[in-house]
Every structure is written in structure tokens, then in C-alpha cells.
Amino acid sequence: MVILQARPSGKGAVRQCQGCQAEFLIYHLTATILCFICYFTHFEENIVTIESSTSIIDLCSDTNYTNHQIPITCRVPKDKINPAPLFSISMDGLIFDVLIGGLNIACSQSQFYPSPNAGVVYQVTCRVVNKITGKTQEQETIITFRKPPLLPPKIIIKGETYQGINALNRITLAAGYTGDMTCRVEGGYSKAHTTQLTCGSLTATGRENVATLTF
């Protein structure tokens, strides 16, 4: 059901009127414009969807989930609804936000869930409320947040790669070696941050994950 509401504007005024599906309707009636606004007063059953790129999320992956920001989108399959429905998204009963309805608002609501705990399963609920009828629809999904497995860091010394910290993480310099020696640590979980490079009595402590020693 669609309700058309007539709303006359001022005499001689020229204006654009909000219309169905974001189209603009302009009516000229003897210098008076009549603006029609379409109100969608219901939507179909079982149309609410929850969008998440995966149901299992590694908290340390190099994706949009960095800094533990998990995108969740709640959607109904119409481009525009006037007035827009009310959206709320929750994880295990914690309500994040409500999108206030208005004219020509895209019918979806995205939320970033901050700092989830690893190793737990969250029940995500999307709730959509029709502002006119008050009818509510809900959809649920399950998302698991997990830590990656424990791994040693990879150590690179002068271009040679070693996995893990042990007695083999050494390199022998030829007599009379001059120049720079660099040690880099990459990856691993928990992540290694500090690198120290030693040669005899010489020691270099790097910034972040790289140390360079000059001979």
C-alpha cells in the first residue's frame, strides 16, 4: 500500500518534490506546485538480511578487521523507503544504534562493533521497525571471533631467513667485513616488536622491528 500526500507550495514557487523511489515529481497548477510524497506503509515478510563478509573472523588479519572493527550491515531490499524504517543492530542483546527514519534514506544500516573478545561466539541480531505500522522484523546470524594460532616470528639477517628464535639465528661474517648488517623481524603471533643485533661487543637496538649495525 502506498499513500500519496498532497502538499501545496507557495504561489509562484518552483521546487522539487520527493517522490517514489527517489524520483522527482513536479506539478504546475496555475502557478501553484503540488508536491506528492510517497509513503511505503509496509514491506514484505522475511526481507531483512544481515551482511558480513565471513562468519569466522581472525582478529589479527590484514583486512577491514584491523583495530577490531567488525562491519555488520542490516538491509531491506528496497532502494528507498519514505519514511525510512528504523534499524537496530545488537550483539548478544547489546543495542548499538538506531537509524532515525527520514526522506529518501537508503534502506540499510551499517555498524562497526569495536573491540570484540577473541575465542567467543556472538549472536548478531538485526531489527527493523516500520515507522507507520509499528511492525517489527528480525534476522539473526552467528559470528565467531578468534585469535590466530601462536607462531614464532620470522627473522631475516642480511637477506637470510630463519623461522623462530633459536641458536641458529646467527650469521658468520668474513674477516674484514665492512658495511651495514641489518636484522628484521616479521610476523608471528604474538607480534614481535623489538630487534637487537649484536656482533662481538657491538650492539644495535632497532626501532620497531628493524636494527642496523654499521661496521
Image: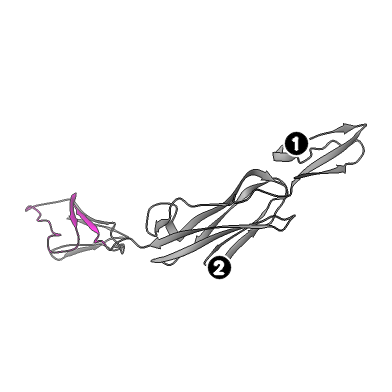
Q: Is residue 123 magenta?
A: no
Q: Is residue 174 magenta?
A: yes
Residue type at mark 1: give it.
Answer: Phe
Determine the residue positioned at 91% across, 33% down.
31
Residue at figure coordinates x 87%, y 36% from the top left? 33
Residue for badge 2: 93
Q: Amino acid at mark 2?
A: Gly
Label 2: how many residues lie within 10 Å, few (<14), some (14-19) or many (20+)? few
Q: Is residue 179 left or right of residue 127?
A: left
| Label whose residue precedes the other's in the sequence (2 or 1) | 1
Q: In this image, 43 relative to 75: left or right?
A: right
Give the quadrant of the N terminus.
Answer: top right
Q: Are marks 2 and 1 in contact (CB under 8 Å)?
A: no
Judging depth in this view, the residue of 8 and 56 nearest the camera is 56
The rendered magenta stretch, by its main secondary structure, is classed as loop
Quarter holding residue 157: bottom left
